[in-house]
Image: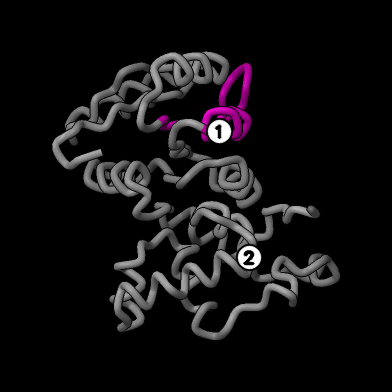
Amino acid sequence: MNSTTRVRAIVADCDFVIRTGLVTMLETVDVKVVGAAVNGAQAIEMAGRLRPDLVLLNVRMPVVDGPAVARQISTFTRVLMVAYETDAKVIKSAIRNGSAGYLVHGSLTAEQLRAAVHDVVTGRANPLSPAASKVLVEACRDTPQNLTAEPAHPPRHSLTARETEVMNIIARGHSNGDIARELCLSENTVKNHVNRIFAKLGVTTRASAMAWWFGTYTMSTE
């Protein structure tokens, strides 16, 4: 997609006020809303028929819930969760099932939404609201009852100290350019680190790497 082409989006939320508010916000940032769905089944049908660039989806949806919708439609379009829910399990489920990012209502501005939409559509980054990032980071700090569980990061996939730094920043939803600036590296160096991380984790996308990092990605046994 070139810079002059408007992003085509579908908004899927069962709440009329939230759905209308998102449509209005998107239109103010020059995103073309081509459809609005009121339940998960409608979102799947509409996405398949209209083939938008992006579906903005609530995690709690009637008929078919958000993660199940994402699992079906993320094979052919980008998905961005926009919800009030900040439970770590819910957020991890959304990411595991194909959502490229997770935004939380309450402090979301039109500019933040615009940036998130374009980051997801272009594949530049996987945006997480601060509230979502906070609960995911806290979930990664093992609680006592989880200390005996299988480690989220098996030793055979251990990363170097620098790769761990890079992966931690990826997990916050930042782009290669952001990582380069934070770590004072060139973008090419960051890209090389990212490629090595993906190879070690056995993933091909940033969303899958994030899901693996948060302990939700199932490695292939083949």
Circle 1 residue: 70
Q: Amino acid at mark 1?
A: Ala
Say which of 42 and 129 sits in front: 42
Left or right: 63 as drawn, with respect to 207: right
Residue that appears at 67% across and 54% down: 217
Q: Amino acid at mark 2?
A: Leu
Residue 186 image-quadrant placement:
bottom left
Residue 143 image-quadrant placement:
bottom right
One can see residue 60 in this view = no
* Place of residue 192 in the rendered image (x, y in percent of width and height, measured from the top left): 43, 73
Q: Seen from this angle, which residue lies furthest right?
A: 148
Residue 209 image-quadrant placement:
bottom right
Tell me the colour scheme of the image. one colour
**Residue 201 got which mark?**
2
Circles 2 and 1: CB atoms closer than 8 Å: no
Element carrying mark 1:
helix
One can see residue 203 in this view = yes
* Place of residue 169 in the rendered image (x, y in percent of width and height, measured from the top left): 44, 69
**Residue 125 got which mark?**
none
Q: Earlier in the sequence, mark 2 or mark 1?
A: 1
Residue that appears at 76% across and 69% down: 151
Left or right: 176 as drawn, with respect to 199: left
Residue that appears at 53% across and 20% down: 44
Residue that appears at 26% across and 44% down: 109
Give how far apart the Cα atoms at labels 2 and 1 are. 22 Å
Q: Which residues are magenta?
A: 55-75
* Place of residue 72 in the rendered image (x, y in percent of width and height, measured from the top left): 59, 28
Q: Residue 65 magenta-drawn?
A: yes
Left or right: 115 as drawn, with respect to 11: left
